[in-house]
Structure formats: structure tokens, C-alpha cells
Image (cartoon, coloured by chain):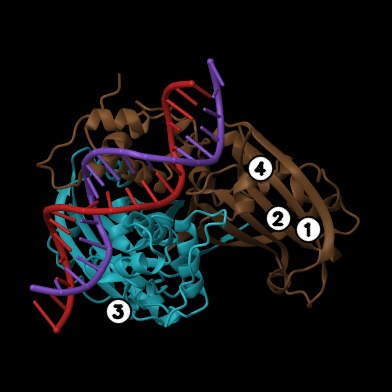
Chain colours: A cyan, B brown, C purple, D red
Amino acid sequence: MLDLGSIDRADDRPPYRQIAASLRRLISTGRLPPGEKLPSEAELIAHYGVARMTVRQALQELRGEGLVVAEHGKGVFVRSTPPVRRLASDRFARAHRKQGKAAFLAEAEVSGHKPGVDQISVTTEQAPAEIAERLRLPEGARVVMRSRRYLANGTPVETAVSYIPESIAAGTAIVSTDTGPGGIYARIEEQGHQLGRFTEQVTARMPTPEERRALQIGAGVPVITLTRTAFDLDDLPVEVCETVKVSHAFVLEYDFPAR
Amino acid sequence: MLDLGSIDRADDRPPYRQIAASLRRLISTGRLPPGEKLPSEAELIAHYGVARMTVRQALQELRGEGLVVAEHGKGVFVRSTPPVRRLASDRFARAHRKQGKAAFLAEAEVSGHKPGVDQISVTTEQAPAEIAERLRLPEGARVVMRSRRYLANGTPVETAVSYIPESIAAGTAIVSTDTGPGGIYARIEEQGHQLGRFTEQVTARMPTPEERRALQIGAGVPVITLTRTAFDLDDLPVEVCETVKVSHAFVLEYDFPAR
DNA sequence: GAGTGGTCTAGACCACGGA
DNA sequence: CCGTGGTCTAGACCACTCA
């Protein structure tokens, strides 16, 4: 059985923190390994002799720290941490595309985790103002918008939305769910836009509630937002990709000359 | 007066989310500017006609996003944000050093904020294992360790610790508080190590309590950690710099070829 | 249907901050 | 002192999951 301890009224920490500390210790010591189910709220209420809100506040603290994930109707589970993915700036190397690998898959191979993609949706819409500006398109121009979610070993680690000018994407596999070997970039190059360079803008913040749901993270887990613009050899922007990554699942690596 | 809206029972979002959305909107549109006090819990309860827990859940959502900070006995306030600093990967360009500007100062000039540096300390110590490895030094080798804190318009935005092999730094201005025109990198180049390239590793996480104090941020505000290694033209590592940045004060920009 | 977590109500007492 | 947020109680109904 699990040693949950009990509440010490002399302790200067409030009960909910003591409960959180007990559970946190069970997790950090491995008594509650990743994927394991925590005692249910009802069990915790009975064990500690407190009201439901008190137990929920403790659980919420752990959720905020990203230690546990609640699944409605099932229980609260110790979060399985995704393997860290190192993203080097050569991950879009043409050599990978030539071998028919999209960036995420090529990188997964190096990191040694099982990659996955789901929640793919493809629509054609008017470009949001900021996207139109980055793509140097007139206001209201139409773009193909590709959303998807990436998984590592079954755990969500990133959501991504790509915007490609309709003039480039129309009639290609870019508008179908499966973009074919080498991914979007391979299709863009087939349209006569050989890729020349990328720019990336990186920052970090707390996730919105929607992002928390999509990435299955607690309120206390920050995300890295990375916006990448791909340019062809004529320095024409051909794609903007906005990604939101679970911070602890990524290390971004860049290499640049001193000039 | 503030337009708080009201709860729509037909809306499929639960009331606490609707309240959070209303407040979030007031903040993002500037109706509630940074530093401003939100309506008190009691006022929100009266306005929306809900129980206190419902209001608190809405506020907690905003706290989790780092949008507001609660101060016991005073109220809930919109978090004030320092000016955003854009860090382009050419910020270490030799041209800046030639003009006698260190990277932080050169970049401040572009961003238009008043830069500051304080809490400077310089010591010589045994290199931590990870640093020694990055600098390709034998275990236990001695390095000059320079710590400092950077400010933008008087607000702390970053702490940084540089490690330079003693063999390079000894006897130069690198070991004094004021490193002279062009900063550390100018001194390293004067020692015959012309800089060739940099690598940077970027990730994000929640701050430790010490970092919260140094950067004067509340819990709920993530930090970006950036570790940079500088290499000379012989590809010898000459400096490792570990920085911790307040996430919302920075946008990192990188530009790299498609290859 | 039983068990789970999600949301909500209507109270209560406490600790902190400022007038 | 009064208004603020912090913590807690003891219930309620709902939506989801799984057998």
C-alpha cells in the first residue's frame, strides 16, 4: 500500500500543501511511477478526513507543476515525461527530404523516440494579418492552413500550424492530409521554390487553456512558441509555421557565425 | 467603468471560463493596463451573480497564465511587463565590438530601452563538470567566472554567468569588474582568439525561488535559459555563458540556411 | 450503473494590508 | 478597523469512462 502520511495540524503549511507534498514525494521517489493512477479524490478525502475542495486544491497544485494529468471519468495519473528532443538548426537539411523524411520524423530517428502525428486538419482561409505580412501577401489573400499535433512515444509534445500561399499549395499534396515523402517542404520545392533559408523567432510563455488541453499539460508548465518562416532562393517567403512546444520536451540548438 | 459583460448560460463554456475570458479581454485590449487593479472578488461575485469559488477559479486561470498577480490583502493586479527585447543572432557582430559596444548595450540601442548592469561579481574557480566539458578543459581546471544581472529601464530581465578559461583571461580586463570597450569578447580577441562561431542551446522552464528573487518575478512566470558557447577560428571553445531570461521580455531570432 | 473528475453553491474563519 | 485574498467545509448536479 501507499504511505500517504497524514495531516499535521501543527505544521505551518496548510493541509492542502501537506497533501500535495505527500503525493509529490511518492511521485519523485518512484513509489508512484509515470502512468500510475493516483488514489481517487474519494479515497484521499477518506484518508485525510478533509473536504473535497481541499483534496482538489492539492491535486491542482500537482497539475500546475505538470506532475500529474487528470483524465475525466478515469482518474488522475502520474504524467509520463516525454523524452527530450534536441532540435538542431540543420533539422531541415535537404538531405533528409531527399530521403523522404519530414523534419519531425528525421529528428525522431536521431532522438530515438517513437514519433506520431494526429489531429491533422487542412483548410483554405484568408490569411490572418500577421501571417499575410510575413508571407508578403496582400491583405485578405488566401492561404492553405495545415494544423497538426506531434507526439513522442504517444505523449503530445507540440502543436503546429503551417500557412502556405494558395498560389503555391493549390493542386499539390499540401492540401491533402498526407503530404507524401519529405513532407510539405519537398512539395514546395517541387513547385519550383527551392528553399534558401529559414528564420525562427522563439519565446516562452504560459499556455492558454486550449493549449493545456491539446498538449495535456498542467497550468504550471510553460510552452515554447517558435515561429518559422521559410524562404526560397529568391528570398520569397513560402511558408510560415507557428508551433507551440511543451518546454521540458525540447532543447533548441542554434549555430551561427561570429561574422 | 469596465465592461465586464455577463454570463451566458447558453454558452457551452462554463461560467468561470466566461469570466476569465472577459477579464482576459480587458487586459489584452489595454482597458486594464499593466499595474492596474482588477475588480475585487466581492465585486465580481456581485456583478456576475455567482459563488466565490467560481470567481476564484476564473482568477486562478489568469494567474496560471501569468497575466495577473494576486497580492494578499491588497487585490489582484495586471502584471507589468518589461519592454520586449528582440535578440537577433547577429548581435555579436564584430562591427559592434569594433565600435566599443558590448552585445547587451548594442542591442539596447536598437530596442530603444535604457540598459543597465548590476550585481557584477568576478571570481576564479574550478570549472563545474559540465562547463569543463563544454570548454574541453580537463576536470578541475580553473576558469574565470563572471556573474552579472541585466536591467531594461530599471527592471531586471536577465542574469548571466560567463566562464572563460583562466589561460585566456588571466592578466586581462576580463578579471576586472569593467571589461572595457567591446566587453569580454573584445578582450578575448585581443588575446589572439578571433571569434569564429557561436552555438546556443535554448529551453524554457519555471524559475527557481532564487531566480524569482533575482529577476523580481512571481511564480507563474517562466524563464528562458540560453547557454552560449563561443568558439575561435580554430574551433576552440573560449567562453561559455549561461543566461536566465524573463521569458516575456525576450524574443530570440535566428536565421539559418536551408543547406 | 458505478466510479471518476468537472463545476457550482453558500456559507465560514483566517491572515494580510492600509487608513 | 475594514476590505482584501487564502483556506476550508459540506453538500449538489453534471459529463465522462468503462464494465
Q: For the residue labelled by badge 4, is the local secondary structure a helix, a strand or a loop? A: strand
Residue type highlighted by circle 1:
Met
Which residue in the structure is indicated by mark 1?
Answer: B145
Q: Of tags 3 and 4, which is closer to the observer?
A: 4
Mark 2 nearby-residue class (10 Å; few <14, some 14–19, many ≥20) = some
Say which mark, if any, is on residue B150: 4
Q: Quadrant of residue A241?
A: bottom left
In the image, taking residue B228 as reference, residue B46 lies left or right, namely left
In this view, the mark in front (1 or 3): 1
Q: Nearer the viewer, residue D5 or B24?
A: D5
Give whichever of discs 1 and 4 has the lower sequence position: 1
Mark number for residue B51? none
Residue B129 x/y as whole percent: 72, 73
**Quadrant location of the C terminus of chain B in the rendered image:** bottom left
Q: Are marks 1 and 2 in contact (CB under 8 Å)?
A: yes
Q: Earlier in the sequence, mark 4 or mark 2?
A: 4
- Tag 3 residue: A100
Residue at numbered disc 2 = B161
